[in-house]
Image (cartoon, grey):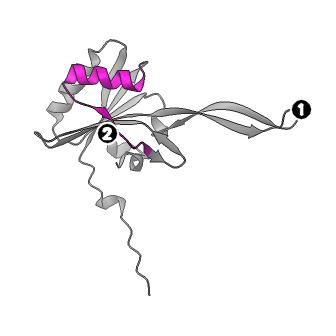
Amino acid sequence: MVTTHKIAAELYDDSFKLIALHCSLNDYAMAYNINKAVKLQLQRSEEDLGVVDFSFPIFEWKDDTNDTNWTLVSNAIKKMEKTETLGLFNEKSEERTHYLIEERKEVDYFLKIDVDDNYIVNTVVASIKAIPNVITAYNIDVANLKSKRNLIF
């Protein structure tokens, strides 16, 4: 008899805060500007965040002094996909956008902070809003997200 163990969503500790960022900067430029504005040390991770068939680049920093993990991840990636068509040309390539959090397609980046302190989050949001090219930044209630499992990393 084989025993199967499953991890229930209720057992996952979601004691992190999520900040949504709207901006037109590339991921490396966004990480640089956040490092400068918030005094972080985000660096490109060697491994991307793999979700289904797609991988999202992530920038992370583990603050050992305050025992806090910081992660910046892009919400959207663009991928060229071939589709079969009827007619003269059998294949057609088109660029499609895939999202980490489907219900938040308007968000460009997410900054995940492993803290419970709202003061820290509010301070970070204010600092990020001061970055040129950032349209807005705000805190998201993780409990209301349908695809929050994609944020487990």
Which residue is tagged 2? 141
Label 2 secondary element: loop
Question: Reading the chain from its start, which is encountered first: label 2 or label 1?
Answer: 1
Mark 1 belongs to which amino acid? Leu
Residue 87's quadrant in the figure?
A: top right
Q: Residues within 10 Å of mark 2 (few under 14, many from 20)?
A: few
Q: Which stretch did the figure color magenta?
A: 25-49
Q: Which mark is residue 120?
A: none
Front one among 46 and 102: 46
Q: Which residue is mark 1?
A: 88
| Residue type for callout 2 | Asp
Residue at (21, 26) in percent of width and height: 124
Q: Is residue 114 visible?
A: yes
At 85% from the left and 33% from the top, the residue drawn is 89
Residue at image position (33%, 42%) is: 142
Say what secondary structure mark 1 lies in. loop
